[in-house]
Amino acid sequence: MNAEPELQQVVEEAAAGNVNVTLTKSDNVTEEQKEQAREWAVWDSITHPQEPEGSGKFPFDYSANHQERVLIISGEATLTPDDGSAPVVIQGGDFVVFHRGFACEWHVTSPMKKHYAYFDEEGKEAQPNNISCDLCGEQCWEDSYLMDGETDLCPLCFETKGSNYKAAERCVHGDTVETVQIPKAKRARKATKKKK
């Protein structure tokens, strides 16, 4: 496998030969990798939709981007590849590169936080080509709302649950197009019986 230039150290092929994942265990992560990752966004497993809710389990497909690189801040997860290869365990301090084509079932066994960023074929940082709602999991790349600078919502969740946030930006294909007002909380209507 051809590793990226900054990954030219002891690298473990995750999943017993699965070339779609490159796992560098925490003992072998370079200071350069750690420094670079500190500039990336932070993902928190607690806010990610899970199936069933609260289970720590969810499917993920990395086909939309050339690479996603992550530095695990804390926590642990077992990733079971869809292709039947051996499960991969990632944990705090590990540096992982998910290559296009990898798909798996995540099982977060200890709440996880990770720095992450997407990269193109030339190794340059790129905007993600996919956005999913952090509440319902619906794909919303075409039209989404970035809430409080960190939570992505689809249009439906924005309308129904957006009042729980302080700031909102409407995004198209991941790019902010405008700052928008937070929707007002919707009150539940009481059922009333008509008198005859």
Image: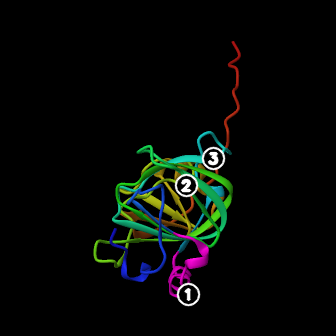
Q: Residues within 10 Å of mark 3 (few under 14, many from 20)?
A: few
Q: Which residue is mark 2?
A: 134
Report the residue at 41% width, 57% height from top: 17
Q: Which residue is mark 1?
A: 31
Which numbered disc, 2 or 1, marks the residue closer to the eye?
A: 1
Which numbered disc, 3 or 1, marks the residue closer to the eye?
A: 1
Q: Is residue 2 magenta?
A: no
Report the residue at 59% width, 68% height from top: 114
Viewer-nearest residue: 18 or 142: 18
Locate residue 68, reporting x and y percent.
43, 67
Question: Helix or strand or loop: what does disc 2 sit on?
Answer: loop
Q: Residues within 10 Å of mark 1 (few under 14, many from 20)?
A: few
Magenta-tinted stretch: 24-40
Disc marking residue 186: 3
Q: Give the colouring mode of the picture.
A: rainbow
Q: Which residue, as the protein is rendered here, is positioned at the far top? A: 196
Q: Earlier in the sequence, mark 2 or mark 3?
A: 2
The CA span between labels 2 and 3 is 20 Å
Q: Earlier in the sequence, mark 2 or mark 1?
A: 1
Locate residue 44, reporting x and y percent.
62, 63
Drawn side of residue 98 relative to residue 106, left or right: left
